[in-house]
Image (spheres, helix red, strand yellow):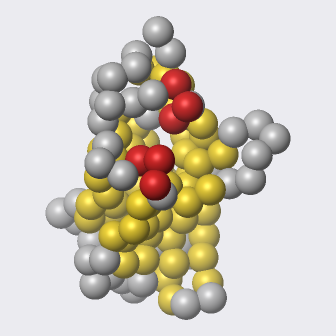
C-alpha cells in the first residue's frame, strides 16, 4: 500500500527559505506525477506546484519565480524549495501523488508559517 510522507516546513521569516520533501513508499510503481497543494482555514485547497514523470512542471502564479519543484535523487520523491517566503504563503502544505491517471493519494499535511 502506497504511503505518502512529508517532511520539512516549520517557521520562517519573510524573505527566508524553507524546503519541503515528500516521499511515496510501499510501491515499485513510479508515480505518474507528484504535486504540492496548500490550504488555509476557510479556503479551498489549491495547487502550488506539480511535477510529472516526464519532468513537466507547473506552478500557480503566486509562487512563480520563488518556488521550485524538483524530483529528488530517489524515485518517488519530490521536493519543494520555497524562497522569498511571504506571510501569505502560510498554510498547511499537502503532497499529492498520482500512481496512475484517476488515482491519487494525499499526505497528512505539513505546516508552513511565515511571520516576522
Residue 54: give x, y in percent of width and height.
28, 84
Q: Kindly give the residue lying farthest to the front in the view shown.
A: 61
Q: Kindly give the residue lying farthest to the bottom in the view shown.
A: 101
Q: Is residue 74 visible?
A: yes
Q: Residue at x 31, y 77 (%)?
A: 56
Q: Residue at x 27, y 71 (%)?
A: 75
- Numbered disc total: 0
Residue 21: give x, y in percent of width and height.
37, 49
- For this view, does 48 lie left or right of residue 83? right
Q: Kindly give the residue lying farthest to the right in the view shown.
A: 42
As rendered, which of 80 and 105 lies closer to the eye? 80
As rendered, which of 28 and 21 lies closer to the eye? 21
Figure quadrant of residue 55: bottom left
Q: Is residue 76 visible?
A: no
Q: Kindly give the residue lying farthest to the left in the view shown.
A: 73
State whether residue 116 is above or below residue 100: above
State whether residue 82 is above or below residue 6: above
Residue 22: give x, y in percent of width and height.
41, 55
Residue 27: give x, y in percent of width and height.
43, 78
Q: Residue at x 36, y 78 (%)?
A: 52
State whether residue 89 is above or below residue 75: above
Q: Residue at x 54, y 65 (%)?
A: 96
- For this view, does 112 lie left or right of residue 32? right
* Quadrant in the picture for the N terminus: bottom right
- For this view, does 60 lie left or right of residue 42? left
Amino acid at each position: 500500500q502506497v504511503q505518502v510522507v512529508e517532511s520539512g516546513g516549520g517557521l520562517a521569516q519573510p524573505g527566508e527559505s524553507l524546503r519541503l520533501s515528500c516521499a511515496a513508499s510501499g510501491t515499485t510503481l513510479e508515480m505518474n506525477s507528484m504535486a504540492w497543494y496548500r490550504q488555509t482555514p476557510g479556503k479551498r485547497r489549491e495547487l502550488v506546484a506539480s511535477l510529472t514523470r516526464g519532468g513537466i512542471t507547473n506552478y500557480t502564479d503566486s509562487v512563480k519565480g520563488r518556488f521550485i519543484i524538483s524530483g529528488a535523487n530517489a524515485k518517488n520523491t519530490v521536493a519543494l524549495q520555497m524562497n522569498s517566503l511571504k506571510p501569505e504563503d502560510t498554510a498547511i502544505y499537502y503532497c499529492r501523488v498520482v500512481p496512475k491517471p484517476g488515482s491519487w493519494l494525499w499526505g497528512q499535511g505539513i505546516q508552513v508559517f511565515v511571520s516576522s
